[in-house]
Image (cartoon, helix red, strand yellow):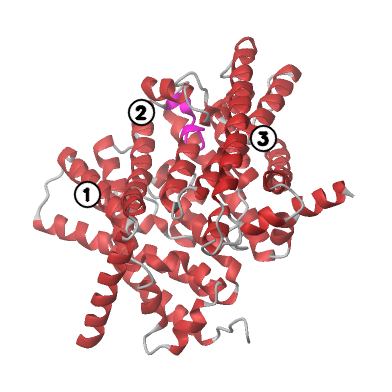
Amino acid sequence: MAALHAWRAARVTPLGELLAPPRITAALLRLTVQVVLVASLWRGLYAHTGATAGLTRDQAVTYAVLAVLASRLRELDQYAGRDTVLQHMHFGTIIYWYLRPLPPQRYYALRAFGEQMYGLAWALTGYVVCLAAGVVDPPKSAAAAGVFALSMLLGQLVLYYVMLVIDQLCFWTLRNGAAMLILIFAQNLLSGVYAPLWFFPDWFITMSRFLPFQATLSVPLSIYVGRVPLSDAGAQLALQAVWVVALSLFTRFLWRRAARRVVAQGG
Amino acid sequence: MRVNAVRIVWRITRLNFRAQLEYRTEFLLMIAIGAIWQVSVIVFATVLLTRFAGMGGWDSSDVLLIPATRMMAHGLMVLFLGRMHGIGRYIQEGRVDIYLVRPMPVHRQAQLEYFPTNAIGDLTVATGLMIGALGRSHLDWTAGRSAYLIAALIGGMLLEAALFTAVASASLRFPSADYWSRWLEDLLGTFGSYPLNVLPRAVGGFLTYALPLAFVAYLPAAVLTGHGHDTGVPYWLAAASPLVGVLAYLGARLLWRWSLGHYTGVNG
């Protein structure tokens, strides 16, 4: 019975997507165009340059295309369904999260899990197509593939917690659209979605080491393309795990504090 | 617009601005987000220019003119016509139905929905980048060249507004089409800021004729910097970029008017 409830909570957002065909078409077209454009951009850039920042052309193209695919993992539009935490706080409907026989943190986790699984289906399909078309290189070895999968899983956990912290902010600030945008932006920039972090200046790479963002995407993708050798992967995985534990404790603490702050329609 | 209409627009805008000031921190953060978002373009461009030997045969001072033009046009678009970007939300919330019963054009009401604070940040960074690009430029900025740059900025603003207005028109019929406008913004930000001739010809063609973002900054900058003959686009067409923006915007407004005539609200 509990499993059935969990399944029902997890599928809410994906179901909303599947019921809006234009959104599916848009996602497909957007992903295809983005992959083609990103791949051509990096190929074009490398036309007159050999390896730079320790990345060859094929490594850079693979990294960039995988980053586009990975960004699908948390791409769902909850805003259309008035289902973001920001909107629930705004409309006062957040109170329902606290009236159900299901703790809000579990409900949130189930919903995010459903979204990430739906996104994973997109990303995996895209990956298989890109691999078949020769846009991305296969992993260097079976070991590299295994370590990458583990690192990606940890990365997704870190991403989940980062997004959760961004949502939890809404409990303290009623109007925080801008703060959320800044955080989402930082997540994109510092995780290497815009360009592999290896191309950035040294001070930028050093700064990223102290922040959780690069653990979400840059680390697993660098392992995949071989920019981080397997001998160094252990330390990177350990760092990712540390972020997972630290953020999980921090968000647990925030959930407890948030529960005391929920006031709906003036109390 | 008649004098009275201008007066009403001005009064509403002032009220909207004061409303934005109600949440001080949010107001400052909105300016910051505009700025930060544009700084990312600068970071990206810097990374590309420092790591790779030129781009598509352009030297770095010429390349800088593209993001500067594009960012300035974008900032002006956000300031004057930017509310078309999020209109899908108003449509989903049924606010268009309210607009329809008021004695003011729907398009104007949508534009007056709120004051775009983030445009202040956008335009601040854009101005800085433009000053930097013009300072590093080896070109002789005659009156003709300067006038063309200003025309290109206005044309770029109108072309970007035309693209968002077209998506907004589609949203009147299919509310979830709003999703496309976010993608459009991504595309404009990512691919509107450097020479498109680094891309394969087919892809460059797509970004010129199918989704005409080349006319926003790349083609006008090519004409200004003397690369106008090697863009793969007829020179007269590249030179007419500002005009393309004007025509596209007029076309988009006609499309908007037609779509509004076919709008059916939630109640049918």
Front-most of residues B266 and A48: B266
Q: Are marks 1 and 3 in contact (CB under 8 Å)?
A: no
Estimate the x, y position of residue A266 in percent, counting from the top left: 51, 63
Residue at 39% across / 55% down in the picture? B214
Where is residue A242 drawn, in percent x and y?
A: 60, 21
Q: Secondary structure at mark 1?
A: helix
Q: Taking the image as drawn, is residue A74 in sight? A: yes
Q: Which three-letter amino acid code belongs to the residue tagged 1? A: Thr
Q: Residues within 10 Å of mark 1 (few under 14, many from 20)?
A: some
Q: Upstream in the sequence, badge 1 or badge 2?
A: 2
Q: Which mark is residue B127?
A: 1
Q: Dot 3: few (<14), some (14–19), or many (≥20) neighbours within 10 Å?
A: few
Q: Which residue is mark 2?
A: B53
Give the magenta part as a residue range.
A190-199
Query: B23 above or below B177?
Result: above
Query: Most prominent secondary structure in the magenta stretch?
Result: loop
**Residue A121 place in picture, x, y as percent:** 74, 45
Callouts 1 and 2 close, C-beta under 8 Å? no
The Cα–Cα distance between marks 2 and 3, rounded to whole angstroms, is 26 Å
**Residue lying at the far right of the rendered structure:** A1
CA gap, disc 1 and disc 2: 27 Å
Q: CA distance from mark 1 to mark 3?
A: 42 Å
For residue A134, the mark is 3
**Mark 1 or 2, which is nearer the eye?**
1
Q: Chain of mark 1?
A: B
Element type at mark 2: loop
Looking at the rendered image, the quarter that the N terminus of chain B falls into is bottom left
Q: Residue at x 66, y 25 (%)?
A: A151
Q: Nearer the viewer, residue B261 or B61?
A: B261
Do callouts 1 and 3 point to residues on the same chain? Answer: no
